[in-house]
Amino acid sequence: MGATVYAGGTTFRVWAPMASRVFVSGDFNGWGTWIELGNEFNGNFSGDVAGAVKGQKYKFITRNQWGSDAWRADPRSAWQENSTGSSIIYDHGEYWWNAQQYSSPGFNEMIIYEMHVGTFHDSPGFGPGNWNSAIARLDHVRDLGANMIKVMPAYEFAGDFSWGYNAAFPFAPESAYGHPNDMKRFVDEAHMRGIGVIFDVVHNHYGPSDLPMWCFSGDCLGSGGEYFYNDWRKSTPWGDTRPDYGRPEVRAYIRDSMMNLTHSFRGDGLRWDATKYMRTQNGSDTTAIPDAWRVFRSINREINATQPWKISIAEDFGGGDFITNDATSDTSGGAGFDSQWGGDFVHAIRAAVIASNDSGRDMNSVRNAITQRYSGRHTARVIYSESHDEVANGKARVPEEIWPGNAGSWAAKKRSTLAAGVVFTSPGIPMIFQGQEFLE
């Protein structure tokens, strides 16, 4: 699917189940003519285009059942000009990997550093940070003792400055961060320093803006078209753009995007954003979306069967063993995640160190936070006192929460260090957020 390079040309293949005809045009034909793709009569259209080579831009043109045409970027684009621009032909085989002998640490040895590429090592006034600027600071992460980097979503999103949770192209690295080869080199350089890379993925919603798959075939079905739910299940806190997990083709789209990260980009794990908003419509179990469980179970079972050393982490905050229990089949058992973010831990520890005196500290909650485990495994939770969510969204860094306006004080530094100490000495997989080591 997407654009696949072969000797002398490129094969284009796209899913457009409600289109009557699909064409492709690009640099290879001067954008002046449309090359029609063959109808496979299974929802897919495909064709070989001689002379279409890597680095050339292209777009699809879909014709709906009423004869209207629309230019579309490739939903499986491996490289984007930007979130509103053309797709670019890319050959994953062109990058030569250097770190051939890297192996991930065991789950019980992982120490995670959460990183946002756009701000990790940026130059104010010169755009966001990028893969190359982040590479320049990898020694710092290694010297801290971290052996895994959890990268906040880094595939193509609207604009250049974002946390990345508004991602629009799940197969294409964010263009503001550099070339796809730069993203591979980041992983390569991390591996050469003994550091693994966990990619943050968002499939509870897409966008909501600049979406190539929105009404892709030209029939919106009353909302977003074939990639999305078009009933009450479409609604999320971030827009009416929840993918339709009930469609096999959409499940394959999600699965393939994740395997692209673990195989083509050699990622060492996945952190799934807000899985509770995949398995429910509004976070309540009374609005369950059973289709999502097929996504969880099938992908986690595949990872465990083919690359069991790669970690799959859920951000669910549902607090249940069912998230990290084994997935026995696509339709039974737990969700099959290796670990999940420990929401109970962070809230209890932050509350204890932020409280101004002992009367405001609940040591029973601290004890429970330290001793809690999911699915009988200490490694089934990721524990932290700071994360991207915990330092924003109306919150702040722990030192600032302890003493607003005086985060550099002795008391604020000592108590925030105590929180970090609890993270590193409690059962679980410890994580810190970038800048936490500087009290920033």
Image: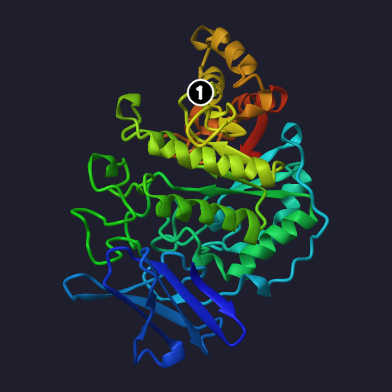
154 over 28 or under it: above or below: above
Count of marks, rendered view? 1
1 over 301 or under it: above or below: below
Q: Is residue 421 visible?
A: yes
Q: Residue at x 58, y 12 (%)?
A: 368
Q: Is residue 383 left or right of residue 249?
A: right
Q: Residue at x 30, y 56 (%)?
A: 226
Q: Quadrant for the C terminus, please.
A: top right
- Where is residue 232 shown, x and y percent of the image? 23, 40
- Residue under label 1: 347
By what rule are the colours in the image chosen? rainbow
Tag 1: residue type?
A: His
Q: In the orientation shown, which residue stands out farthest toward the right?
A: 101
Under circle 1, the secondary element is helix
- Where is residue 272 shown, x and y percent of the image? 51, 42
Closer to the camera in the image, 356 or 379: 379
Q: Residue at x 34, y 66 (%)?
A: 16
428 over 72 or under it: above or below: above
- Where is residue 8 shown, x and y percent of the image? 59, 88
Q: Is residue 409 visible?
A: no
The answer to which image quadrant residue 106 occupies is top right
Q: Is residue 177 left or right of residue 421?
A: left
Q: Is residue 301 left or right of residue 276?
A: right
- Where is residue 136 shown, x and y percent of the image? 70, 61
Closer to the camera in the image, 427 or 135: 427
Closer to the camera in the image, 237 or 349: 237
The answer to which image quadrant residue 9 occupies is bottom right
Q: In the orientation shown, which residue stands out farthest toward the front?
A: 41
Q: Residue at x 73, y 55 (%)?
A: 190
